[in-house]
Amino acid sequence: MIRRIGDKSGRRLFIIGLDGASFNYLDPILDSCDLPNFRKFFEGGARSDCFSTIPPLTPPAWSTMLTGVNPGKHGVFDFLQPDSSGLFHISDASTRVRNSFLDHAIENNIRTINLLVPYTFPVSEKNNGLSISGLGTPSAESDFIRPHSYRDRLLHDFEFLRNIDPTRNESIETLHKKLLKLTEGAVDLGKFALNEFPDVGIFFVVFQATDLVPHFYSKYFDPSHPDFSDVSDIPNDFRDSLAGIYRAIDPFLGECMDHVEQDGGWVILVSDHGSGPLVGAIAKDAFIARWLEENGYLITSGDSGRTRQTAKAEMGSFANRLLYLAKKYTPHGIRNLFNRLMGESKEKIVGKITAIPFMEDIDWEKTRAFCAPGGYGVGLYINRDGDFPHGTVSTGAEYHKIRDEIRAGFESMQIVDGVPLFRKVIPREEALWGPEIRFAPDLFLLWREDPLLRINNYTLTNGMRLDPPEKKHGSGLTWCGTHKIEGLFGIFGENVMHGISLEKTPSLNDLLPTIHLLSDLAVPSDIDGSVISEAFDPEFIGRHKLKIRQEQHRHDTANFIKGMVIGFGLAAVASSFFNLFTEQRSRRKEAMATETRFRRHDESGNVLGELSNIIDESSQAFRDAVRTLDKTFESGQAAIESVQSVIDKIREP
């Protein structure tokens, strides 16, 4: 149904992602501003709120939209999370264990363009159009553009691609201008891609500014915000900041609809979550950590009495690339076997290379629970024996006892009598399901954004105090907006009902099966969503049935062997580095014990230089080996797929 590579006529699917968008902010702009194409879209199409994930954060939400499954199956829960070794790492596309609809489209020879989609770094090597990763890209120097042949040209022509963090070094007086230029640049990038690949079948772009503007400017344009003021000295461009973003997107939305009206197809609008006023507090992870410490669940080893959080984000490093390959191709059973065989060596080697050293003053051998770092304060972990390097809580009765105690403690917190601080405190198995749930927080805390917190000076009935939102965000800017679980969805195009609001609210799980139906692609049998059929003419839905692919994951023989080789290859190289470093350090100490001070200094420099050369040569050799393996196993993969197709034909009735 969607046009394929080489076919310059026929249907196309355009997906426009509006990060953090929701109708509570978009509808007032539609009523007061000139947005002819957004208005045409909703008058001629279907719309609805769209439920996000628990928690409603960018990494798990976009991952669910891409894969059609909940975080318990795709494995992304937060910005930072533990892996199978129990060490925390920055989440990225390698954390996600499920293929996306983009992967499925490419496998079926549908040309795809995906621009600035969050958490698509590292960019997939399987690419038949243009891929540029969005939020989660570590730096402009990283490998975030495919094909590589476009890199220099795009970085020259679209300077905003060099600026990974648009809030950096900005003030409230300048940020909205920066975000508007970023949006205009993304629009121009989208136009370039469409001109460069006229036979594209699926086009997907995400605009980030629709999330960032509410985070920092909502108190200037949202009358429901407790800090909103109608005074005339508020700059008009502050009040107009979000409307300006939608005005910049509006003509591009119109161009996409023109393509659909001319050639056939659909345009989808979707957000990962919604936005609303930040009425409560910030630094919520610090508040949770303080309560855990005061109640004896979290034990610190330093004198600060408070956890310290640091992060080294070496996401684009060679070591992380190796881990990405190993994670991508290694089945979970082999990963677990590999972890057991490596034992403490894996913790030392992999941990030192890529782990994030947060909460460095915690006494892990006495701690029973801790909060995931990051500021949102939505995930709480039990220090489980067998899951974390120094787990103290055994599974079974002890685990449930401690988790129930902590849950009861947070559920008892009240802003005022009868008004709990948390809307819900949810055990992970009540919010998620699937094999990756073992990496999820043990409790999810859904905070209540209630003005009573301000009235009571952010002090609870138990005497504890939260940090008010006047405190600065890490960029130096002040937060005034937060996330809502209700995002938005809309669709325009062939056989779509005109001007309706859906009675049943879809979720992000439902996007993949809907996209697959329109693309005539089979879906994995264990997806969590379903087609958003209410948006279409019943006759159209009656004629087109969703195809089901029985196999869930394709951990075939080639990928199995590849994962083994890469995993053990990583272990061998890392172990060699570790042994070389130990040997050279011992040699240096012996030299320093017998030589003069200047001699010692000179020799240590030679040793370190020699070690650096050895590491460089070994790294290059391993890179070459991985490239050779990739080519070898791609050939093996093709052969296996040919055999599989023959088997499938034999099985056909």
Image (spheres, rainbow, N blue to C red):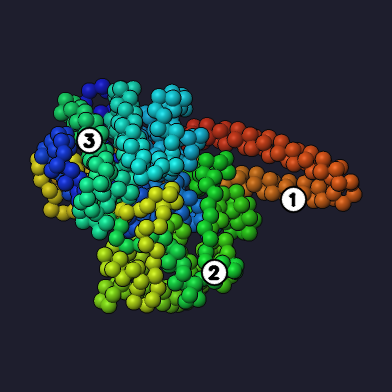
Q: Nearer the viewer, mark 2 or mark 1?
A: 2
Q: Position of residue 299 (x, y in %)?
A: 54, 71
217 w.r.t. 431: above or below? above
Q: Which mark is residue 305?
A: 2
Q: How would you rate the neighbour count of disc 2 (Cα within 10 Å): few for under 14, some for 14-19, many for 20 or more?
A: some
297 to the left or right of 232: right
Rendered residue at 16%/39% (across/down): 33
Q: Which residue is mark 3?
A: 247
**Mark earlier in primary sequence (2, 1):** 2
Q: Which residue is mark 1?
A: 582
Going by the numbered disc 2, the residue's amino acid type is Gly
Q: Does residue 83 appear in this view? A: yes
Q: Position of residue 347 (x, y in %)?
A: 60, 56
Residue placed at 74% from the left, 50% from the top? 582
Mark 3 residue type: Arg
Q: Secondary structure at mark 1?
A: helix
Q: Secondary structure at mark 3?
A: helix
Quadrant assignment, res 103: top left
